[in-house]
Image (cartoon, helix red, strand yellow):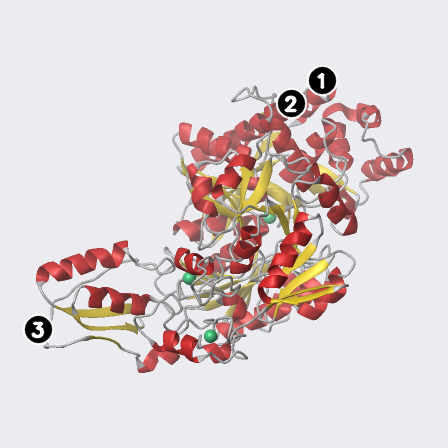
Amino acid sequence: MQGVGFRPYVYRLATRHQLTGAVGNDTHGAWIEVEGAAATIATFERDLVTESPPLARISAIQRTETPPTGDTHFRIEVSASDDDQRPDVTPDAATCADCLRELHDPTDRRHGYAFINCTNCGPRYSIIRDVPYDRPQTTMSVFQMCDACQAEYDAPSDRRFHAQPNACPVCGPEVRLTASDVDLHGRSAIEAAAELLKSGRIIAVKGIGGYHLACRADREDVVSRLRERKLRDGKPLAVMVPDVATAGRLCNLTPADEAALQPPGAPIVLCPQRPDAGLAKSVAPGCRDFGLMLPYAPLHHLLFAAGLGPLVMTSANISGQPLTYRDDDATAQLADVADAFLTHNREIYRPIDDSVVFTFRDDAIPMRRARGLTPQPLRLNGLPPGATNRILATGGDLKSAVCLLNGTEAIVSEHLGDLSHPDAYRHFVQSVERLRQLFAFDPDFVACDLHPRYLASGFARQLDLPLVEVQHHHAHIASVMAEHGEVGPVIGLSCDGTGYGTDGATWGCEVLRCERGDFQRLGQLEYFPQVGGDAAAIETWRPAAALLHAACGDEWRSVVQASPLAPPDNALELFSQQLAAGLNAVPTSSLGRVFDAVAFLLGLCPRNRHEAEAAMALEAAASRHDERPATPYPFRIEQAADAFVLSLREMVATLANDSDRHTNAPQCAARFHETIAQGLCALARRAAEQADISVVALSGGCFANRLLLSRVVELLEEAGLTVLYNRQVPAGDGGIALGQAWIAAWTCIT
Ligand code: ZN
Ligand code: ZN
Ligand code: FE
């Protein structure tokens, strides 16, 4: 409960009810002793739950009666063990309603102050250097509280009692705007920045976890200038909107979307674009959704208060590199991109990106777990009673995140980026060190991906600890089992881009029987050759050519050549030779590559400039088609020696022969989605019947595709199966560290 203001909250509540007694913490949680009339205590207990502070979570209340002691007042006990307890470091929280009211109140001493916070909101994880969570251990240590702030900090009745980042304009950090001809501080800096944004300038804005690049989202000339200067990879840009009403004018929001946008998490929520949204085309080219978020730092609120509309607010990282968060790095790296810098002198110690979620059946499902979610621990059910080991799981290389499992409590780190860039790998190593220090975490075991060349696995292998290597798709399914406390056996449907298989092939669409820490492969997508190494995951004609070759033989070449997206002849010739000789051609069952191939066949996307660009274009096209469900293409389930195989040859041949496939792309894309959904369900059902299992777990990056996720869940449920999917960690590779840790916890005990 540290840092969430629970004890002062109890103090205020008890005092209000005129109850005497005390509140304190011990290793089991908070304890409260109250003395008074039975009816008053009953009301107190009810209010305790209903009025609980936004960041506190009451999971259970146990009550016992004790003899009255005749206390005359209520007190907060600061237990001696406070310092030795493993800290519950909380995530950064968006500005609360009380602070927001003060921020906009001209009579308040923090009117217009960009660092207002209280025990219910403000920075936490991003500013903590070490434990215990106390001001000297945060990046606020350089600011000496003024008398007024100190009085609040010391008063149990105050909303800022022990609020470590407490500050005001007299004693706290300060905003600064710099440009070639500008150097302003405080409120005039914010007002000037707002004017620059209105006039179409690009500003680097230092926020809670790092720098953003901000500009108007409604002017094509402005957004395309931002793209020209930096963001050439076509990635969709996040948009910050002043309020939920504005969000509703840009996107079709469900009540779940509206709820997901709110503080304290305030993540980026992916929502379907409205045709009349009026934003610049290049905000999210080729996408069905906008990634929307609400202002979450007081600075954002102050910018919008100056009358700004929707702003592009994209993480300021140079392609592939980690998030920019140090002031000197920002000045150096963003000088050619930003027209001005809106920065401040509160240091960010742990850089942390914005979280990204989408909603499905009222759940906000993370695609990227970071600000507002990390380091909230997950308590795992279902592990064996003796699971007391400390396990460090190092995750994957793309969408990297690590997991610290301490017995049954798992902390999944923030998104650490793509490790292929040297700076990103250095950042990964430093983040692991800092997490281990923060949680005083000394692992007994280390778990990693089986891949021989993952950097995250290399890191694990050199740690000189007992090592558990985990197959990639098994880890995906185990992440679902860990979340749900499901020991198995389950049928796992693991669908993604690539993972290293136990047979050396590149797996990517697997049906696994999973129980405890073990798995057995029961089914797969039919292998096809992945020709050309890394290029096979970028150029969409490559998987298309390989699948066409399997489906139509020698005709493949004329089909590829006829496409407006056709590669040059010499590339085709080399491909043809490699295919014939089996050179540089690894067998793959990647479903991600099938999405790429079909995006090529429909003329939608020549190359993945960023991960899953082709798949997103295909999903966007399919969602433009109204018929639900669409008619599937033919597919086949074949019984091979030891596994069921889903063959898509007939689908590919049908698509290749459909001369209207470019003009009818939305319909073809919808039919393709339905084919995959039905094919996956058929595979899962065959495996479930054979193994006599009624629970199916879905995971892997392909299930970030909501069209696919919702249809697969629907079909499996119609077939009478229980369906589990990720709700706490991403279905993509950001979730595999949790699965690795779960598997290691089972493996290390037996
Ligand atoms: Zn607050
Ligand atoms: Zn102050
Ligand atoms: Fe994966």
Residue sitting at the far right = 570
Mark 1 belongs to which amino acid? Asp
Q: Are marks 1 and 2 in contact (CB under 8 Å)?
A: yes
The residue tagged with tag 3: helix, strand or loop? Answer: loop
Task: From the image, tell me which residue sits under label 2.
Answer: 668
Q: Residue at x 13, y 61 (%)?
A: 40
| Residue 4 visible in rendering | yes
Task: From the image, tell me which residue sits under label 3.
Answer: 67
The image's mark for residue 658 is 1
Question: Where's residue 30, x and y in %?
Answer: 28, 68
Whole-angstrom CA distance, mark 1 to mark 3, is 83 Å
Question: Where's residue 478, x and y in %?
Answer: 48, 51
The residue tagged with tag 2: helix, strand or loop? Answer: helix
In the displayed structure image, the side of residue 605 where residue 301 appears, left or right? left
The image's mark for residue 260 is none
Question: Where's residue 87, x and y in %?
Answer: 41, 72
Q: Quadrant of residue 57?
A: bottom left
Mark 3 belongs to which amino acid? Pro
Q: Quadrant of the N terminus?
A: bottom left
